[in-house]
Image: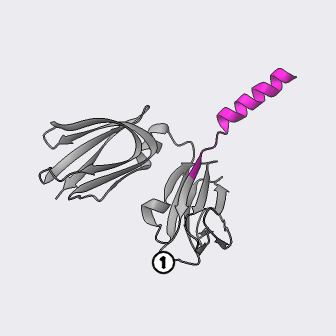
Amino acid sequence: MRKITFLLFIFSTLCFSQTTYTIDWENGVNGEDASLTIDVGDMVTWTWTNSAPHTVTSLSGSQETFDSGTLTGVGQTFSYTFDEEGINNYQCDVHPGSMLGTITVVDNLKTEEYFVRNIKLYPNPATDVLNVFSLHQLSSYKIFNSLGQLVIQQNVSTQNLKLDLAAYTSGIYFIQLNSDENQKSFKFLVK
């Protein structure tokens, strides 16, 4: 009997593994900072990072309905597990114009697709700085110019990069981002 219970535990862990994502929730958090692409069964936790009152409330037309109610204080949290594939637009009802985002839920998101969907480059076009945000831990990056020549290569261990572009000439560049399992190139412009 123990063997069957153990096998069921292993099976359920492999088939129904859940990832939890955290969004720091305060005035002015919106757009890319408040948006994620996740897999069915994943959980999002919003953490209040200021003392103002806030809500996390799904908007009409969202795939799922959720509402934190009004919570006040640094460290307050609201968590929700998304069980259905679809688009979930949400906002803070106390600050609707400045606190909003979208949780996109997909079924069986492939690791490479998940890696690509959860990388943000901004601003693009860039002038002095290019910010890279990833939900995955990045292990290295390479930047190539439009002729395919390697401009820089760095090993890193971070989810966020702030790249100094002050010495770059105007033009098209490509950044190749690597995690332990995935690699993808993105185009960016330097003005």
- Find the magenta span and give its range: 1-21
Residue 184 part of the magenta-drawn span:
no
In the structure shown, which secondary structural element does the residue marked by tag 1 occupy? loop
Which quadrant holds residue 70? bottom right
Residue 174 coordinates in the image, percent (x, y):
23, 44
**Going by the image, does 121 lie left or right of 32?**
left
Which residue is rendered at x = 58% and y = 74% of the image? 52
126 over 97 or under it: above or below: above
Color theme of the render: one colour
Pointer 1: what residue? Answer: 97
- Left or right? Give the position of 23 relative to 78: left
Front in this rendered view, residue 171 or 154: 154
Residue in view at x 77 percent, y 30 percent: 8
- Percent across and percent down for residue 48 are 58, 64
Secondary structure mostly seen in the magenta stretch: helix
Is residue 14 covered in magenta?
yes
Q: Is residue 154 left or right of residue 22?
A: left
The residue positioned 44% from the left and 40% from the top of the image is 137
Relative to residue 170, is residue 11 depicted above or below?
A: above
Vertical side of 125 occupied by 16: above or below:
above
Q: Quadrant of the N terminus?
A: top right
- Spot occupied by residue 6 in the image (x, y as percentages of width and height): 78, 26
At 76% from the left edge and 25% from the top edge, which residue is drawn? 7
For the residue pair 88 and 47, the one nearer the viewer reads as 47
Which three-letter amino acid code belongs to the residue tagged 1? Gly
